[in-house]
Image (cartoon, rainbow, N blue to C red):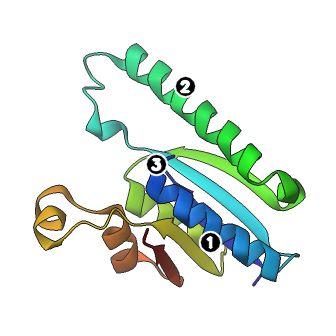
């Protein structure tokens, strides 16, 4: 295990995935971890209030980055934070490929088939698109 991608949105579900990523870093102390936050601006009324959306995303990104630094304090030399904008599942898979990761770790919201059909699911999308192994961590 050389490189791991942890996709996070700062949620409680992502915290469980973070704990799993720590377990992997302990098992493979030479591994590198890329912590990725993807801003999905298509969920906002971006065309109408771009400055407000950009400011909100900046605050969210900084909060997630700070939390990541705190959570991985003992692994700071092995952890790199990355922020991207785009469709979350596609962007996660693209970054996984670009970074040549051995594993993608992300949390699951535990949605059922009806929610996936109506709302979509990042975890489901990553599972369908990924060219790398994926570990979906449930609560």
Q: Which residue is mark 2?
A: 59
Q: Secondary structure at mark 2?
A: helix
Q: Earlier in the sequence, mark 1 or mark 3?
A: 3
Residue 72 placement (x, y as % from top left): 77, 54
Report the side of 59 relative to 77 (left or right): left
Q: Mark 3 and mark 2 in contact (Cβ < 8 Å)?
A: no
Q: Residues within 10 Å of mark 1 (few under 14, many from 20)?
A: some
Q: Nearer the viewer, mark 2 or mark 1?
A: 1
The CA span between labels 2 and 1 is 26 Å
Report the side of 8 relative to 32 (left or right): left
The CA span between labels 2 and 3 is 15 Å
Q: Earlier in the sequence, mark 2 or mark 1?
A: 1
Q: Which residue is mark 3?
A: 11
Q: Which mark is residue 122?
A: none
Report the side of 57 relative to 119 (left or right): right
The CA span between labels 1 and 3 is 15 Å
């Amino acid at each position: 295990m050389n490189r791991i991608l942890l996709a996070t949105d700062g949620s409680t579900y992502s915290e469980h995935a973070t704990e799993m990523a720590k377990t992997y870093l302990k098992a493979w102390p030479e591994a590198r971890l890329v912590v990725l936050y993807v801003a999905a601006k298509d969920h906002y009324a971006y065309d109408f209030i771009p400055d407000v959306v950009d400011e909100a995303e900046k605050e969210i990104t900084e909060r997630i980055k700070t939390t990541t630094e705190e959570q991985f304090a003992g692994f700071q030399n092995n952890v790199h934070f990355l922020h991207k904008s785009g469709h979350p599942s596609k962007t996660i898979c693209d970054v996984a490929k670009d970074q040549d990761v051995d594993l993608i770790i992300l949390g699951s919201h535990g949605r059922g088939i009806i929610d996936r059909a109506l709302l979509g699911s990042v975890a489901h999308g990553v599972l369908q698109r990924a060219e790398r192994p994926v570990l979906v961590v449930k609560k």
